[in-house]
Amino acid sequence: MSQSTATAITSPEKNEWDGGVSPMGVSYGKLMMWFFLLSDAFTFSGLLITYGLVRSSHHAYTGSPSDFIFSTEYWPIPEKVFDAVPFLHGVELPLVFVGFMTFVLIMSSVTMVLAVEAGHRMDRKAVEKWMLWTILGGLTFLSCQAWEWTHFIVGLESPTLVKDFVNGEWITKEVFGASLVINQYGPADFADFFFFITGFHGFHVFSGVLFNFLIYYNAVTGVYERRGHYEMVEKVGLYWHFVDLVWVFVFTFFYLV
Amino acid sequence: MEHHSHEPQVIVLPPNKEKIKKLWTVAGILGAITALEFIVAFNMEHGAMKTSIFVVMTIIKAAYIVGEFMHLKYESKVLLWSILIPLAFVIWMLVALVYEGMKIVRF
């Protein structure tokens, strides 16, 4: 029953050229959501393209990956930085945790689209169920990110020797973890982009969880049942899929390449 | 007792099994591509070839998410192109700036 998103406004006085038909065959809200997402895609592109620019301007590590050590002289290999998993201290599991996070986000995208499908059928119970799963997926992702940030900021067991400009002279000091100014994994830009890109994405996930909760609340209280359609689930669903989409790109360009 | 007149009569339709099956298939494809990315990540030398494979896989995943989950494939063609054509600027800017970045001299 995808007609619940019917767009043609059938009014006898209004023909196609008087606003009688919704442009592009979608409702106003969905169209605006699409254009918002396009602009948001540009924002994320700006961040990722700048990452590409700055990364390609730094020296790349040229040795064998097995001999890799952290240094501010070259850009680090991401899988060497992100190889920790909660409760498995000291075990090297490159990209496993971030792989789990990707899986969680994709699954929550699936439960979201199942909520949309249930909305088309006016199945309130199913919408509630799938929205709850989606919210749970979002919260799980955020918790994982909180752990990953903490690990990144606190740092490793052993420090990296970093050259720093202090009181007018260059000194070499031991650095643990990361801040916006200095970090033990590589050039300062590396940590800055980590904080900005994953932070901006994480903030989108956080907002998404709030929107999803609002939708769940409205579904439970019967707002959409009284309205006669569940189009709001679709609109917030578009946003939620977009957040998943951005993560697909962040995962590739920040963690894999 | 009379029924509550302010509660609307709602007709709940049965689940669209075909559609739900298709959604899970898409989820499976997304999971499989991600698994493949992991295999490539740990079994290939770093280089232009590896990066190209990742880019292609990412675009395939993006196409499934936008086309199926976000339903764009089934919307009107005007909407589809209104979203896709502006993104050409992103590709241009990415290529231009990554190339320029390689020309920045660091000591």
Image (cartoon, helix red, strand yellow):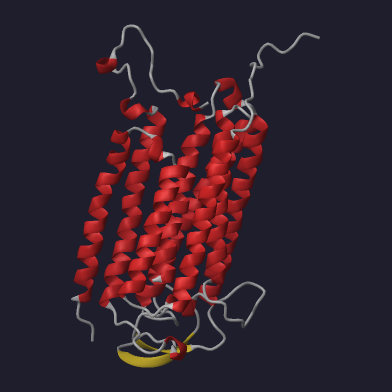
Which residue is pictured at 57% across the width and 86% down the height? A157
Tell me: A190 left or right of A155. left
Whole-percent x, y for residue A240 in the image: 49, 46
Residue most extreme to the front: B18
- Check the image and report above or below for A23 versus B89: above
- Image-quadrant location for residue B80: top left
Say if residue A39 shows up in the picture. Answer: yes
What's the residue at 44%, 23% (across, down)?
Answer: A6
Q: In the image, residue B68 lies at what x, y percent?
A: 45, 43
Q: Residue at x 61, y 57 (%)?
A: A140
- Relative placement, left or right, of B90 versus A228 is left
Check the image and report above or below for A69 versus A197: below
Question: Can residue A212 be seen here?
Answer: no
Label count reads 0
Question: Which quadrant of the rendered structure holds the C terminus of chain A?
Answer: bottom left
Depth check, front residue: A80 or A36? A80
Q: Is residue A143 left or right of residue A15?
A: right
| Outermost residue to the top | A12
The x, y position of residue A70, in whole percent, is 43, 86
Residue at (49, 55) in percent of width and height: B30
* Nearer to the camera, A201 or B80: B80
Q: Position of residue A13 (x, y in %)?
A: 31, 7
Dividing the picture into quadrants, the one containing residue A118 is top right
